Amino acid sequence: QVQLVESGGGLVQAGGSLRLSCAASGRTVSSYDMGWFRQASGEEREFVAGLWRSGAYTKYADSVKGRFTISRDDAKNTVYLQMNSLKPEDTAVYYCAARIHLAGEYNYWGQGTQVTVSS
């Protein structure tokens, strides 16, 4: 199985950028579909971005399209979420996840990293 550790969160002003990293160990990230999710205080966890294991297909929530980019570095066994033009409503704990089966549930999760966007 794979272990996932997120980093890169922090406090940023509206309009700023952050890059989140998800470092994997135990298995290669290219063996899984990878996703980023977020959970704001008092809200349910929501899907943000996904990258299929082939690397050829990505998917984004409507709220982040054009602003966020998911990518993968196989040499570093790491998945990234580049977040630009951040808004206060992007404030949440961001989680990295890995999925074994196409279109199935995400099986492995990181511990999360806090992103706070001030207005």
Image (cartoon, rainbow, N blue to C red):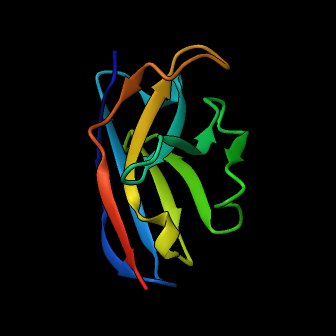
- Which corner quadrant holds the N terminus? top left
Q: Can residue 7 be seen in this view?
A: no
Query: Taking 47 as reference, is 118 above or below it?
Result: below
Q: Can residue 42 be seen in this view?
A: yes
Q: Quadrant of residue 58?
A: top right
- Which corner quadrant holds the C terminus? bottom left
Query: Taking 88 as reference, is 80 above or below it?
Result: above
Q: Where is residue 31 in the image (x, y as percent from the top left)?
A: 51, 22
The residue shown at (55%, 50%) is: 71
Q: Position of residue 55 (x, y in %)?
A: 65, 38
The residue shown at (70%, 44%) is: 59
Query: Taking 16 as reference, is 115 above or below it?
Result: above
Residue at the far front: name it.
42
Left or right of 72 in this view: 13: left
Q: How many labels does the image show?
A: 0
Q: Position of residue 94 (x, y in %)?
A: 39, 50
Please tell me which residue lies in front, 97 or 71.
Answer: 97
Q: Quadrant of residue 22?
A: top left
The residue shown at (49%, 43%) is: 37
Q: Position of residue 11 (x, y in %)?
A: 30, 75
The residue shown at (46%, 40%) is: 74
